[in-house]
Image (spheres, grey):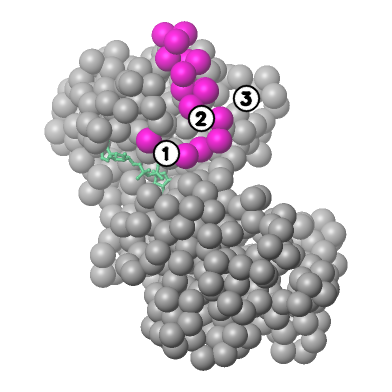
Amino acid sequence: MHVAMIGTGYVGLVSGACFADFGHQVTCIDKDASKIERLRAGGIPIFEPGLEALVAQNVRAGRLSFDTEAAASVKAADAVFIAVGTPSRRGDGHADLSYVYAAAEEIADLLDGFTVIVTKSTVPVGTGDEIERRIRARRPDADFAVVSNPEFLREGAAIEDFKRPDRVVVGIEDERARPVMSELYRPLYLNETPIVFTGRRTSELIKYAANAFLAMKITFINEMADLCEAVGADVQQVAKGIGLDKRIGNKFLNAGPGYGGSCFPKDTLALVRTATDAGSPVRLIETTVAVNDARKKAMATKVSAVSGDLKGKTVGVLGLTFKPNTDDMRDAPSLDIIPALQAQGARVQAFDPEGTHEAQALLKDVEFRADPYAVAQGADALVIITEWDQFRALDLDRVKSLMAQPVLVDLRNIYSPEDVRSRGFRYSSIGRA
Ligand SMILES: NC(=O)c1ccc[n+]([C@@H]2O[C@H](COP(=O)([O-])OP(=O)(O)OC[C@H]3O[C@@H](n4cnc5c(N)ncnc54)[C@H](O)[C@@H]3O)[C@@H](O)[C@H]2O)c1
């Protein structure tokens, strides 16, 4: 099949490379000429494990190419994917659909023969209807079907998630789209991946319901962690004790500093707005959003609670991205925690294995250092915000010898309290005595 992927970001590039690897002929398109130039030169604009090799392999095989212009590939395409961003609209939290509609209108002008237009971007219920209406208004003669096919991949494990997903969701209103979508995902049929065909609106809502549920699950265990601290219980064991119940499951029960990232914050907020507008408010999600926002900001007080007044002190921060194995800084907890530390008078020095470049543009007055030990140097407290593997086995004796005061605040519970304390640290973590 011929595929045109409009938008070559985290989702578009991974999806495009994986479809090419399935054997399809894929062109990834982006307005950002520097991105396309870099890809054409054999580079990768984002950090995602395994992606560079997958892209190179499929470019070499002649199945994957990159372009700033959509015309040729959209005309030749059986399926055109829209994988552009849908950030929070400034001011009201609705999903900003301007990139989606701009892409749809651009596609409309280029349609040639029956084409399936697939929305991979996360879009509110009814967006597929509106895309169809806009294309029809612009090109009454065009022959097309608009499909919803939300993406569930996780950054950091994106290729594995795309190639071995728990399920694929496809929302169609025109039966002609079914064989096209089935053919695109044929390799997954062979793996017996469930392909859930549904109506378009239902498919759009499934994506938001999934993200909102996961955000709520994280927020639930975070509140349990606070309660554990208040009553002298251990949240890791609470998580294990409830997670073994198959109805609950053990995933997404790691207490931490609050969820962040490119999806949960904006998608929970957008769902709240959609539901309010529809007259059917989702109070659990409203509360999830409020609890999580407050939590991220409150994490700075965990530092002063162990190290005392932060005025004039130096705080070292390990990990800035919203999770490990990505360079994505969108809505990362570090963006709330670091300014809150600075507001208490702390000087911040930080290190992230892949996110420094992105972080530099977003964080003010932070000194970026070259490795974890350089961050520990002279620090009055060391805070682990993101659980990169390389932070899990630090030489704690060396860390202690470098620090001005041996204070470790572990917001991801990656160390054992007994072990760290036995080495002479004052140690604080999440939901553990
Ligand atoms: N990042 C994730 O982990 C993830 C997971 C699942 C779903 N999603 C959803 O997928 C969508 C894309 O997310 P992302 O993280 O890949 O975003 P991104 O910002 O990384 O990429 C979007 C790309 O689209 C390009 N673009 C915008 N308008 C364009 C146009 N008219 N023509 C060509 N290119 C255009 C931008 O230049 C950018 O490179 C969002 O709706 C997001 O919610 C993201």
Circle 2 is placed at which residue position?
51
Crowding around mark 1 (Cα neighbors within 10 Å: few <14, some 14 to 19, many 20+) is: some
Kindly identify the residue that appears in the image at 29 percent across and 13 percent down: 76
Say whether disc 2 or disc 3 marks the residue closer to the N-terminus. 2
Crowding around mark 2 (Cα neighbors within 10 Å: few <14, some 14 to 19, many 20+) is: some
**Real-space CA distance between mark 2 and mark 3, rounded to the nearest whole angstrom:** 19 Å
Say whether disc 2 or disc 1 marks the residue closer to the N-terminus. 1
Circle 3 is placed at which residue position?
188
Element at badge 1?
loop
**Real-space CA distance between mark 3 and mark 1, rounded to the nearest whole angstrom:** 26 Å
Kindly identify the residue that appears in the image at 52 percent across and 23 percent down: 53
Say whether disc 3 or disc 1 marks the residue closer to the N-terminus. 1
Amino acid bearing label 2: Leu
Amino acid bearing label 1: Ile
Looking at the image, residue 365 lies above or below residue 185: below
List x then y, in percent, for residue 220: 65, 72
